[in-house]
Image (tube, grey):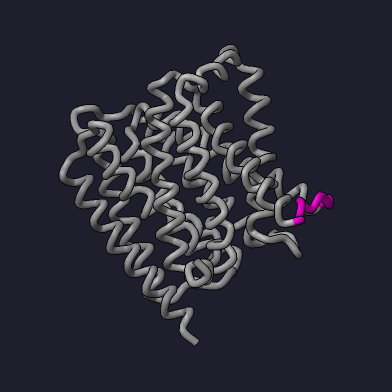
Amino acid sequence: MTRLWHSAPGLLLVTGTLLGLTLPLGKIAAAAGISPALWAFVISFGAGAVLLVVLVSRGRGLNLDFATLRYFAITAAVSYAIPNLLLFAAIPHLGAGFSGIMLTLSPLLTLAISLILRLRRPDVLGIAGIAVGFIGAVMVTLTRGEAGQPAEPFWIGVGLLIPVSLAVGNIYRTLHWPKDSGPIQLAAGSHLAAAAMLFAMVVASPDASSFSLLGAVPVLVVAQVAASTAMFAFFFRLQAVGGPVYLSQIGYVAAALGLFAGTVFLGESYRLTTWLGAVVISIGLVMTTRAQSSADVP
């Protein structure tokens, strides 16, 4: 575990895999009648609460100075509440696998923003890997969802907004990481802030009684909370070790897992072009992983 905690490629694979589990679980939740806002609340509240308990058990708590609270609020909105709402709203219309592919556009947007802001530029292999991954994502996007069930342009647009929000969050967290704050502290505080936002949204909506629906799927809720809690602990560590552009590669891993889970377990069907795009994305992941490994060698 200690070695994994210091390995950017290892953290990338673990974090991306745990993120990918959210896609099929989200589709199952939607089929059970759980709204996107409520399921996003489950993720943020569950992860935030468990991580806070871990902190307290270690004799630590959350920093509550103004700068850190601002960080919690902004990160909660652009990294969790908004993209999760969009993701869980889109999954029933695009499929778990196709929705996951939208995550792969985050690296390109993260790189573009980082170059504009003159953050550290990736090397040639890293840039090439991101470009290859993007080509694969375009191939998948053009298929418009499951075979025989082309999605409406509106939902394609909703899906495309997901990586925009994620990219903004990637850059913001790097530029404004609070001093003297660890990854678990930031993950706990940001998710609890997101949970508060989402709770207000659910209560204000006409289907506020949908909280009772969670009792009908306890195993699903526990599985989602466990996966998201572990994922976000590794997520913030990966942010510190790999930086914003490398962090954004988790979308490639999540998309591949989402395609596999959607096809094997949820009965989704995708065109050959979609699968070829997934292969191209995987090649891009290998290239960026090697680039990061080379950068880590002294």
Dominant secondary structure (helix, strand or loop) of the stretch shown in magenta: loop
Relative to residue 60, is residue 145 drawn left or right? Answer: left
What range is drawn magenta here?
A: 59-66
Residue 215 versus residue 66 in the image, above or below: above
Outermost right residue: 65
Outermost bottom residue: 298
Q: Does any portion of residue 176 appear in the rendered image?
A: yes
Relative to residue 62, is residue 19 drawn left or right? Answer: left
Identified at 35% across, 30% down, the residue is: 153
The reply to whether the magenta stretch includes residue 87 is no
Q: Quadrant of residue 89?
A: top left
Relative to residue 185, is residue 22 drawn left or right? Answer: left
Identified at 75% across, 64% down, the residue is: 180
Decide which of 80, 261 is in the foreground and name it: 261
Expressed as whole percent of the image width and height from the top left, the position of residue 31 reads 38, 22
Expressed as whole percent of the image width and height from the top left, the position of residue 121 reads 51, 72
Identified at 32% across, 33% down, the residue is: 95
Expressed as whole percent of the image width and height from the top left, the position of residue 167 reads 52, 52
Outermost front residue: 57
Decide which of 155, 64 is in the foreground and name it: 64
Q: Quadrant of residue 80?
A: top right
